[in-house]
Image: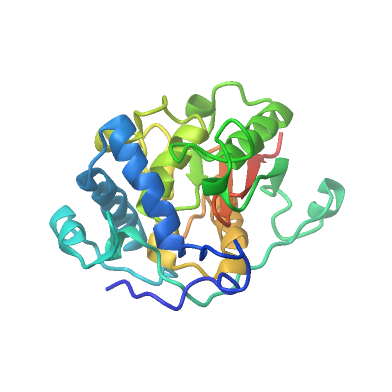
Amino acid sequence: MDEGGSGLPGFTLFGHPLYPTPSAPAMFSMAATRCFHEFGWTKEDLARVAVKNHDNGSHHPKAHFRSKITIEEAMRAPMIADPLGRFDCCAMSDGSAALILTRPELAESYAHADDYIVVKSNQISARTNFPWYVPPNGPGADFTAFPSTLKAAEMAYKEAGITNPRKEINAAEVHDCFTITELINCQDLQFCDRGKAAEELKNGTFNWDGETAVNPSGGLKSFGHPIGSTGCRMLQEITKQLQGRAEGRQVPDAKIGLCHNLGGAFSVASVTILGQRD
């Protein structure tokens, strides 16, 4: 079973002087209810994200949660912040990850001289941490898209020369802190048209062997979220996917990968493009 914690550190220490800052589940529940209204998505659509990621995580030896779940189990789970239930929320967790960053000429002297992975772009975009107080055409958000992800992705694709993300990105680890977040991320990262993420998920587009594999490791839903090390873990997972040595499910013929991380109230996003050496 997934389990919760006391929430992100520091959330009770800053914010509006009169109005309390909502919890992380409450923040993303607002996005879920808005997407339900705008796109016609349902709680069953959210459940499919959890089922997919727990299924992927069941194959990964380092995943925190390694049990498959059903749509029915996800939909019957206790409510956390309506419409987000227990299986719609990632667990707070402990963990660590490490990366070695160096120049290509030095990489050739290491163990993976023949298959080291190249960072094609790394971009970060920051917006307001209080989107509910500002208009969406300013630094805020309309709760159906995350402006920080949109901008970071735009910059990363431009630098990496990616013109058709859905066709060119083979494997992606995206920030599925909540099931609704993954669906919105798939749209913001241009893996599908706006409003179509739930339909594409149902059709298998984002399966580990689908057109664009999303969270083939099992994501935060299966690993939990140790905050600081989550991004490094994602980069490690995609690096191994591109080297053909994934510890869980191996995405077939993966050559270009993406890592996406989201922080705060959808306020800061990082998008990194990794690729095989030329």
Q: Is residue 39 left or right of residue 161?
A: left
Residue 268: image location, x then y, percent: 63, 50
Residue 159 falls in which quadrant of the image?
Answer: top right
Q: What residue appears at the point 45 percent right and 70 percent down from the top-left corner?
A: 62
Residue 252 in sight in this render: no
Q: What residue appears at the point 32 percent right and 68 percent down from the top-left corner?
A: 66
Q: What residue appears at the point 25 percent right and 43 percent down from the top-left corner?
A: 45
Quadrant in which the N terminus is drawn: bottom left
Q: Residue furthest top?
A: 163
Q: Is residue 161 above or below residue 259?
A: above
Q: Is residue 73 left or right of residue 109?
A: left
Residue 14: image location, x then y, percent: 63, 68
Q: How is the image coloured?
A: rainbow
Q: Nearer the viewer, residue 149 or 157?
A: 149
Q: Nearer the viewer, residue 208 or 147?
A: 147
Q: What residue appears at the point 31 percent right and 71 percent down from the top-left corner?
A: 2
Residue 163 in sight in this render: yes
Residue 15: image location, x then y, percent: 61, 63
Quadrant in which the C terminus is drawn: top right
